[in-house]
Image (tube, grey):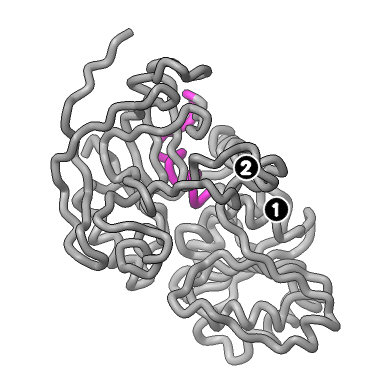
Amino acid sequence: MTVEIPTTQRALVFDTWNGPLEVRQVPVPVPADDEILVKIEYSGICHSDLHVWLGDLKDMSVCPLVGGHEGAGSVVQVGKNVTGWELGDKAGVKLMNFNCLNCEFCKKGHEPLCHHIQNYGFDRSGTFQEYLTIRGVDAAKINKETNLAAAAPILCAGVTVYKALKESNVKPGQIIVLTGAGGGLGSLAIQYANAMGMRVVAMDHPSKEEHCKNLGAEWFVDAFNTPDIVAHMTKLTEGGPHGVINFAVARKPMEQAVEYVRKRGTVVFVGLPKDSKVTFDTTPFIFNAITIKGSIVGSRLDVDEAMEFVTRGIVKVPLELVRLEDVPAVYQRMIDGKITSRAVVDFAL
């Protein structure tokens, strides 16, 4: 089997932070001996892509840059030292790669904490282009029965919410609060939480109540007009939820979560507000034995587990397919808080 590979490709490039996003012709990369070349068919558009472009994460990114880190496509070339991959296989390109596999964190399955990682769409060109190289050991295997468009967002958004739910330590039958539940991450988290047996309280703008309940939220709380969130949440859940995952890109819900979570409950921070410094009263934090965690994407195994829910049809990704040229408009909708689905670039459009 041979595949014809062009010498140039379309890519979405920005030369300065918060500068113009332009579709240009750039060279198609040649895979190293330990890499595969993936023809990207779909690329999810993540909120962190927006942060990188705006310059909110300058310490973690480079410029000029091709953004994107949720790529799904087909293998079109295999390096001579690569095993386990064949032409035509479906492969995923996730955010964090090039980890050493030999340090303390890699050995314990905490691969995203490896000091050697490189991040597609942050410090190396990402998935907003038609072809991309990735080490064979880093690429995610995607079942050929899996919808590739739906698979793309799972490589970051899906595994991020799945890992955060695991980190919450909430057991089947217990209550989890999801702030920012109506957004791209929250829409997936509601479904994963239900599949894992949790009872979901969705918190977001009132315009997103129907959307959240249709996805399976048992309760909905208006994050903007409820007079006393802490008192309301404590009463609603009869003592506070067992866990809270903060997807909202704001400081206030992060601080409120520490106040209303149940004794011995866990608060997981995922959303990245620009002003991300939070304060809270240490006395109830200590006396109520509350746990606060940060959670960032997941390991290779977490990706495989998260993807399996989609392959089986248990988690359905609310998709909006867009052109590569539409990414700037999607960013603006993210800024305006008008995203209720996972926008995915379809390179065939």
Quadrant position of residue 171: bottom right
Q: Specify whether residue 137 is painted magenta.
A: no
* Alpha carbons under labels 1 and 2: distance apart: 10 Å
Is disc 2 placed on a helix, strand or loop? helix
Residue 302 circle label? 2
Residue 265 shown left or right of residue 308 in the figure: right
Residue 166 circle label? 1
- Label 1 Cα crowd, 10 Å radius (few <14 / some 14-19 / many 20+): some
Q: Is residue 153 above or below residue 250?
A: above
Residue at x 44% of width, y 49% of height: 119
What is the x, y in percent for residue 308? 59, 35
Question: For the view shown, which residue lies furthest in the top direction?
Answer: 1
What is the x, y in percent for residue 345? 30, 45
Taking depth in this image into account, of 299 and 167 the one nearest to the observer is 299
Q: Main secondary structure of the magenta part?
A: helix
Residue at x 56% of width, y 44% of height: 315
Residue at x 22% of width, y 57% of height: 14
Residue 131 shown left or right of residue 22 in the figure: right
Amino acid type assigned to the residue bearing label 2 in the image: Asp
Q: Is residue 325 above or below residue 312?
A: below
Contact, mark 1 vs mark 2 (Cβ under 8 Å): yes
Which quadrant holds the C terminus?
A: top left
Q: Which residues are magenta?
A: 144-158
What is the x, y in percent for residue 30? 29, 27
Which quadrant holds the N terminus?
A: top left
Is disc 1 placed on a helix, strand or loop? helix
Residue at x 45% of width, y 58% of height: 184
- Label 2 Cα crowd, 10 Å radius (few <14 / some 14-19 / many 20+): some
Amino acid type assigned to the residue bearing label 1 in the image: Lys
Quadrant position of residue 131: top left
